[in-house]
Image (cartoon, helix red, strand yellow):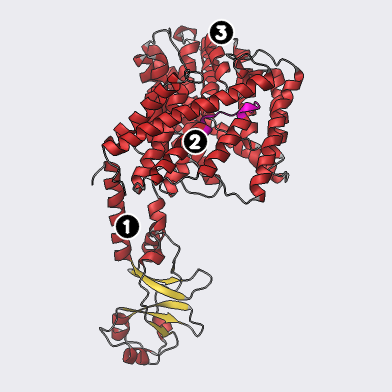
Amino acid sequence: MLEARGVAVVLLASVVGVMSGMLVHAMSWLVQVMHGLLFGLQPEARLSAMFSLGTPLQALMPAVGGIILGLTIIYLKKWKFRTPIDPIEANALYGGRMSLTDTFIIAAQTMISSGFGASVGLEAGYTQVGSGFASRLARLFRLRRNDVRILVGCGAAGAIAAAFDAPLTGAFYGFELVIGIYSVANVASVMTAAVSASLTAEVFGGVPFPLELSGLPTLTPSQYLPFLILGLFGGGASIAIMYLVTLIERAFTRISIDASIRPVIGGVLVGLLALLTPQILSSGHGALHREFAMNYGLAAVASVFVLKLTASAISLGSGFRGGLFFASLFLGALLGKVFAGVMAYVSPATGIDPAVAAVVGMTSLAVGVVGAPLTMTFLALESTRDLTLTGVVLAASIVSATLVRETFGYSFSTWRFHLRGETIRGAHDVGWMRSLTVGSMMRKDVRTIDASTTLAAFRDQVPLGSAQRVIAIDANQLYCGMLIVAELHSDQDADETPVLALAKFKNTVLVATMNVQAAAESFRRAGAEELAVVTSFTDRTVVGLLTEGYALRRYAEELDKARRDLAGEA
């Protein structure tokens, strides 16, 4: 087994970064080829930068993509493939273990979705392939659990760095979203992956479409408060987007449309919206650059915002594969321009520049959706190279993140986990806690006694000092309660009193599948030092006994081990 610390993990991170850069470039190139073939684009043109579709028939392309995606859904159902696991879920629950099969499925479906014009981004596919490759490499070298998680974060960091030519953005994406925590011990690995991925993408012809925003006007102190208000609007808009996607998903479920048909319907709707403006198609790289290059009127910008928001929600809600990373940047830029236009009427003296407002809005809304304030702040820094503007962006991002956290509690990725019944709030490793179950900690040498036994008979069968606790069971061997031996020997009740009348915790039990956190909560609610473990809440056959002290000691040991792993201690 490779003891992957220091130089070893940095070397592996550099390999992960190079592969992530190559994979991002390959995926982007293939999707661009698809756009050229399906929409008649020139090699350097971008789909969402078109002023209008070449022919009305091109509006059918998202529906065609929906048909192909629907066929993949039917195939996956037929062969009973599990729901694919993304990097955040893998790091939170499975110690970074990812399946290459899942990776290929997500990458292929994402390219189909974006390639045929659905209003989704490729970033989810980028991070999936980068992290999937990293996970397989880590397992090949039989790395420790935390090292696998770090390499998975390196893969995601490299993918985002390559996609935006922004190493700092990629690194903090890895820290905030995939690893779940910033640690000095892991800086070298994650930064190495991000830098090597960015350089690799440049070697292969440059990043897909980098953000280069320059020549922005200087900020004045009077503009800071309005931009903080814009941060609030960005957070509110991000919550609305997440709710809208969920409402569309639930609408499809209520009308009982099969999952394989939903992308076709969604594709038709997106195609109809594309007849109004192609800016809603795909992720929106070209459209974002158009918004920064041109000065459209308030009504035009607001209409594109509504159309793009609707198209993205329909695409994701109907089952197209992809993410909202870049779509949220585009929507945020539009929101910022709308805000600047409104401020020009409300308070002309403030003098808010639309391009600056677009940058602040872009990051504020994206922070709410993606859930990564520092990632978006560094994206603004690496795009504008303006430290003053970056400070305002950071403040607005914090306002947005605080609003979303306090009123909603989830980012887009963790919100979708919540809808599936998971309790994941981020990529923090909770998998070790789930594996630390009551069944793995309980004692199986349990002493039981019939619940109808009299107090006198109990004292004869269980002398004082022979045991601390005995479990009362009925004629069917089912749990009835806990008997404290010392208490029953000192009790003044009549000798003919059945011990069942003196039993405690009759309605409080543990089951073997409970994790240590749930067990600790049961101990706290019951005020018990020891509880019986039964087969299930319906079948109360006693299988063991667990003490609160032992459970908390094991929890503390595992927690300390996790802390030492994160800190890079041996």
Q: Residue at x 32, y 83 (%)?
A: 488
Kindly report which numbered mark, 1 or 3, lies closer to the viewer in this rendering: 1
Q: Amino acid at mark 1?
A: Tyr
Q: Write the start and end of the magenta stretch as one range.
A: 114-125
Q: Amino acid at mark 2?
A: Val
Residue 531's disc number: none
> What residue is disc 1 on?
555
| Cα separation between marks 2 and 3 | 37 Å
- In the picture shown, does residue 552 fall above or below 474? above
Q: Secondary structure at mark 1?
A: helix
Q: Amino acid at mark 3?
A: Asn
| Residue 306 visible in the shown view | no
Mark closer to the chain start, 2 or 1? 2
> What residue is disc 2 on?
129
Among the 4 quarters of the image, the one containing residue 400: top left
Tell me where residue 531 appears, x and y as whole percent: 38, 70
- State yes or no: discs 2 and 1 in contact (Cβ < 8 Å): no
Kindly report which numbered mark, 2 or 1, lies closer to the viewer in this rendering: 2
Tell me where residue 415 appears, x and y as whole percent: 52, 41
Q: Residues within 10 Å of mark 2 (few under 14, many from 20)?
A: many
| Cα separation between marks 1 and 3 | 58 Å
Seen from the viewer's position, the closer of residues 19 and 306 is 19
Residue 295's disc number: 3
Seen from the viewer's position, the closer of residues 324 and 139 is 139
Tell me where residue 297 appears, x and y as whole percent: 60, 10
Among the 4 quarters of the image, the one containing residue 512: bottom left
| Cα separation between marks 2 and 1 | 34 Å
Among the 4 quarters of the image, the one containing residue 152: top left
